[in-house]
Amino acid sequence: MENFIEAKQLISDSKNIYLVCSETSEAVSSVLALFYTLKNLGKNVNLIMDPPAGGLPENLKFLSPSLDFISYPKNLVISIPDSVAKISQIYYEKNDQTFKIHLGLASGNVKKDNVSFYYAEAKPDLIITVGIKDYLGALDEKLDSFGFLLDSTILNIDNSKDNKNFGKINLVGEIPLSEIIFNLTESNPPASGKESATCLLTSLVVYTENFKKNITAEVFQMASNLMKAGADLKEINNNLKII
């Protein structure tokens, strides 16, 4: 696969990185591996995902005991067009049950349809997508929350033949996502610790259905390297319960 050198340079040059992934077990375990690796490289990494209620699926919780690091936007903006009303005064009240913002109007009349809400966050240096076929489609219903991610540089990692190649750099091929990420990060052995190795091997086990299909020499070589790095195949199988 081409573009690995450019992709590695893009990561090296970026400090603030957002990771966006699909909800498949292969993508989630792969993006967690990338998260751990980039953290160990000293990057400011924000992970955006939509885990089911209660966090990760039960069979993947062993990869991350806590999801406290998952990023959600925090800077909420309430917008009212100046042409609708002139705001003369703002104050708020807060108690244990509610937080209310009061607006005093100098002129005009504000209706619900006139008020818009969105989040304003700092634009990241780089966005890395994992297992996303169509970036705009994936964000379509989340633009109020994640609109700040638009127009940033994208590194697109996927193994779907239907991928729309929306990134500045596209690492797309019909191979395991874990193999793409392994090849992307293998030049940084100190950063690829046990946590990352466990996540990558988990993703590989999911992709191959516990080494029953999609088997190549590269798959076995990578599995061997990941186990040498500390990944425990027995622990992974006990949690995934793939027969």
Image: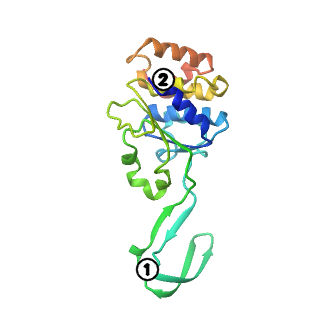
Q: CA distance from mark 1 to mark 2?
A: 54 Å
Q: Which residue is mark 2?
A: 179
Q: Position of residue 235 (x, y in %)?
A: 56, 23
Residue type at mark 2 is: Glu
How many discs mark residues in the rendered view? 2
Residue drawn at (50%, 22%) of the image: 237
SS for dot 1: loop
Q: Is residue 117 above or below residue 134?
A: below
Q: Quadrant of residue 199?
A: top right
Q: Position of residue 190 (x, y in %)?
A: 67, 25
Q: Is residue 160 above or below residue 109?
A: above
Residue drawn at (57%, 32%) of the image: 9
Q: Is residue 37 above or below residue 111?
A: above
Residue 188: tell me if it is visible: yes
Residue type at mark 1 is: Ser
Question: Where does the N terminus fall, quadrant-wise?
Answer: top left
Question: Where does the C terminus fall, quadrant-wise?
Answer: top left
Q: Which residue is at the front of the view, 121 or 227?
A: 121
184 with respect to 116 (left or right): right
Q: Position of residue 58 (x, y in %)?
A: 50, 37
Q: Quadrant of residue 173?
A: top left
Q: Which residue is at the front of the view, 30 or 127?
A: 127
Q: Position of residue 110 (x, y in %)?
A: 43, 81
Number of the front mark, 1 or 2: 1
Q: Which residue is mark 1?
A: 83
Q: Is residue 52 above or below residue 222?
A: below
User: Which tag, 1 or 2, sits closer to the chain's start?
Assistant: 1
174 with respect to 68 (left or right): left
